[in-house]
Image (cartoon, rainbow, N blue to C red):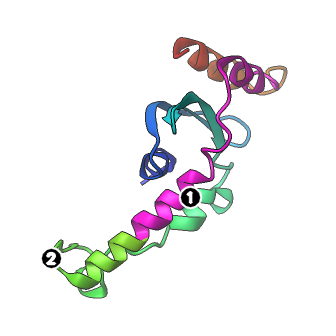
Amino acid sequence: MSYHSALEAAGAEVHVFESFGSYQGDWWAKVTYKGQTGWIQGSFGSCSGCDAFEAEFDYSDTACDSHRYNEQPNCEPCQVLKKAYEEKLAKFGEGFLDGIISQEAAEEYAGKHKDWDSEAEKMVAFLKEHA
């Protein structure tokens, strides 16, 4: 699972998603959500300890103890855990979807540190490629 899957779980149509090795590890996604199409951005941090997704989901269980490595679709405890995980994933994804921005705003934001962040130009190029 990933930020991409969290956005989809929240109900967004993800047109394109890309991660960049910038200072804080940026990701960009072009989405359509509740009739609005545009860009959203997030950071996955420079290490696993500061990645919001990993902090929230790294040890999440989607199967009961008996089926930890072999999830069983007909096992009621597995179903309960999987449903809870999917709800948590959707709620996490929703947190990013209230900040959809325009193409111009995305390009401006992505390029704001181009004087020192070597990934800034790559991010702007990606955004322009998928305008």
Residue at 55%, 14% in the rendered image: 131
**Amino acid under label 2?**
Asn
Question: Does 77 sit left or right of 120 as displayed?
Answer: left
In the image as oriented, which residue stretches furthest toward the right?
115
Return the residue nearer the eye: 24 or 96.
Answer: 96
Residue 89: x and y in percent read: 48, 60
Residue at 60%, 44% in the rendered image: 97
**34 versus 3 height, above or below:** above
**Amino acid under label 1?**
Phe
* Quarter of the image where one finds residue 103: top right
Q: Quadrant of the N terminus?
A: bottom left
**45 versus 131 height, above or below:** below
Return the residue nearer the eye: 113 or 83.
Answer: 83
Residue at 72%, 26% in the rendered image: 110
Question: Does 60 sit left or right of 113 as displayed?
Answer: left
User: Does the magenta stretch mainly form a helix, a strand or a loop?
Assistant: helix
Residue 114: x and y in percent read: 79, 21
Give, as a single range, the part of the protein colored magenta. 85-113
* Quarter of the image where one finds residue 120: top right
Q: Earlier in the sequence, mark 1 or mark 2?
A: 2
The residue that mark 1 highlights is 92
Q: Is residue 53 magenta?
A: no
Mark pair 1, 2: CA separation: 27 Å
The residue that mark 2 highlights is 74
Residue 96: x and y in percent read: 62, 47
Residue 19 visible here:
yes
SS class, disc 2: loop
